[in-house]
Amino acid sequence: MSDVEGIERAKVPEAGGDEGLTPVHPNYRTVLRITIALTALPFLVGASVLELVRPFDDAVPGGIFVGPVLLLAGFFLWRWPRRRYQARGYDLGRDRLRVARGVWWRSDTIVPFGRVQHIDVDRGPLERAFGLSTIVLHTAGNHNASVSLPGLLDEDALAMREEIRAHIKRDTL
Amino acid sequence: MIDAAETPAPIAPEDHAAVTVAEGEPVRRTAPIGLLVRLVDSVRQAILPAIGIFFVAGEVREALGFLPLLGLVVMVIGFVTWLGWWKTTYRVGAEDIRVESGIVSRQARSVPYERIQDVSLEQPLVARLFGLVRVKFETGAGGGEDLNLAYVTESEAERLRETVRAQREGALDIDADDPAAEAATADGQALFAMDEKRLLRFGLFEFSLVIFAVIFGAIGQLDFLFSWDDMYDAVLGDALEGQGRKLAAMGLAAQVLSAIAAAAGVVALGLVTGVVQTFVRDHGFLLERTAKGFRRRRGLFTRTDVVMPAHRVQAMTLGTKWFRRLFGWHSLKFVSLASDAKKASHVVVPFGQMDEIVPVAEAARIALPPESIAWVRPTPKAWIDTALIVSAGILVIGAVVATTVSPWLLAAPVPLLAVVGGLSWFSWRRHRHATALEQVFVRTGILSPQLTAAPKVKLQSVEIAQGPLAQWRGYATVQFGLAGGTMEIPGVPIDEARRLRHEVIEAIAAVDFSVAQEA
């Protein structure tokens, strides 16, 4: 009996891979880039200070601190936001939200609206500057107690919240 | 102040000017005798340091000098305890239970009735002597953020529990259920109980060497009191040395015999520890099916009384251990939002045969896997990958050690690798999952096999997680959101993972709460 179900259900597009995922707003890439730049800044400053102070005198060649840090930061600024952005996606179904994230450690979560306990719409200062919001769905499960989807336009996030809220029933436990 | 001696004391109006009693009952305080229990607790905790002071001081005359200080400390503690009690008030309202507490910074916590998962009663030994109970209103909030009332009288505790129950089930039920009748044992139908014989058998299987850890821990703790080295030299050293000399003189047979005797001693101590622990924890174990759920009572010194509403049971775990499994002994736990003494699940059958466990599972409306169930095995890839990584690590460490210490050590990793391989194979063999009867079944564990069964509709979310290796090799871990517990299936081929997720999500989304309940 379960075989029949299995065949029948394998056809559903959602059962497939990354197709059918909606990308988040491109501004999210910029937000990621700025976040990475801000994270890299202290390291750059530290390396520059070491370079200027030269505690090891001439024992090490110049640029040994700033060089690698600059290279790493450059790599992360250039490649990383793009890959993270591409890995990020969602699919708003009739009764469920699917959120995919992560490049190396990939996770692909589906939360049925009927299991949402409450919804947050968060807006950090950076996100606000780019007109973005993060929607966070809270469930009663210990695992995935909160599932967040960043990089939504403000109005999209609010519309999504209203839609999900309409589905939440009082006693879903 | 004097009127506070009544139990439970309604507070004079001027005391709670800030508290507006709009509806429901008056504001109350916990039982004043509870202060005595806390005092006894404090004294019990203070007794070791006090002894310590005497030891450190060495001389009684010097130690007596500490007495006024000690008295002052006791007075301050006593006053603060009293003030804390005085400032803690609770009120059973029309919609919620409120507790206000705090001396300097005040806290007011309100818990609506429909959010209370369990009301559990706990009686530590001292409280039990005074007929007092700690009432816990468990909401499922993490981090010990539950509402906690310590201590109230037994009758008040029972009243609170009945109030919560009646409130949650709605106004209609209040007329239907006489609280007194509900409280009576006769109302419940006993599902599982353990007598002394069973406890003894259980205890023997709970063989534990934890006593040695405790002894060594205590030695470490009390190190500041006396020098164990001195003591060893003075007492044990001579004795042991003497024994050693005697042993050496006795010859091989005697040495072997005494080694056996020592081993037997350790085993006996382990068995006794297991039995004692079991008796203390599970004495008088009684699980009942009441009108609205399950009620579990157990404990020799600290008596606990937990009520679990049947519809709050999210899943259950059937567990065992390799040795007791040979004799058919299993345990059954309920996973629910409320936690049970810091553990995620409620033990409902600690030690029983399958024919005793099946009725309990049926009462919770969760089925055990049927004989005909089609188990799905995970892909061995996940275990192979992990084993390879661990083996590589062992080999690297082995090579480093071999080059720095002795080339002969190069052979040392070989048995380790065999162990890693064997364990991985076993672990892979033990893992399997299935879906049937609108439930998900997951089996794991090498030495302690566990089977978790959860109705699909009770699951909260489904995640497919893949690390870099898993992405490359095409498998995933399926993680289910389970209220009050965890449930995951590792090493599932990605297609099966997606199919499983789809099946479960469809079942969850389809529930419009008019769903037919499978019997």
Image: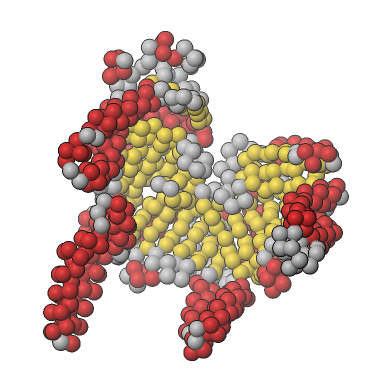
In front here: A18 or B181? A18
Q: Residue at 24% across / 74% down in the picture?
A: B263
Q: Residue at 76% across / 62% down in the picture?
A: A65
For residue B260, what is the image quadrant?
A: bottom left
Q: Is residue B106 left or right of residue B126?
A: right
State the quadrant of the N terminus of chain B.
Answer: top left
For residue B53, what is the image quadrant?
A: top left
Q: Is residue B519 left or right of residue B48?
A: right
Residue A11, compared with residue A156, is above or below; it is below
Q: Furthest-front residue in view? A: A57
In front here: B247 or A15? B247
Q: Furthest-right residue in view? A: A26
Q: Is residue B158 in view?
A: no
Q: Residue at 50% across / 43% down in the picture?
A: B143
In front here: B213 or A115? B213
- Residue B344 lies, in percent from the top left, at 46, 50
- Residue A51 lies, in percent from the top left, at 77, 58
For residue B42, what is the image quadrant?
A: top left
Q: Furthest-bottom residue in view? A: B408
- Residue B349 lies, in percent from the top left, at 36, 55
Q: Residue at 59% across / 73% down in the picture?
A: B386
Q: Is residue A147 in view?
A: yes
Residue B421, compared with residue B358, is above or below; it is below
Residue B81, compared with residue B26, is above or below; it is below
- Residue B396 lies, in percent from the top left, at 58, 79
Specify how the rendered protein is coloured: secondary structure
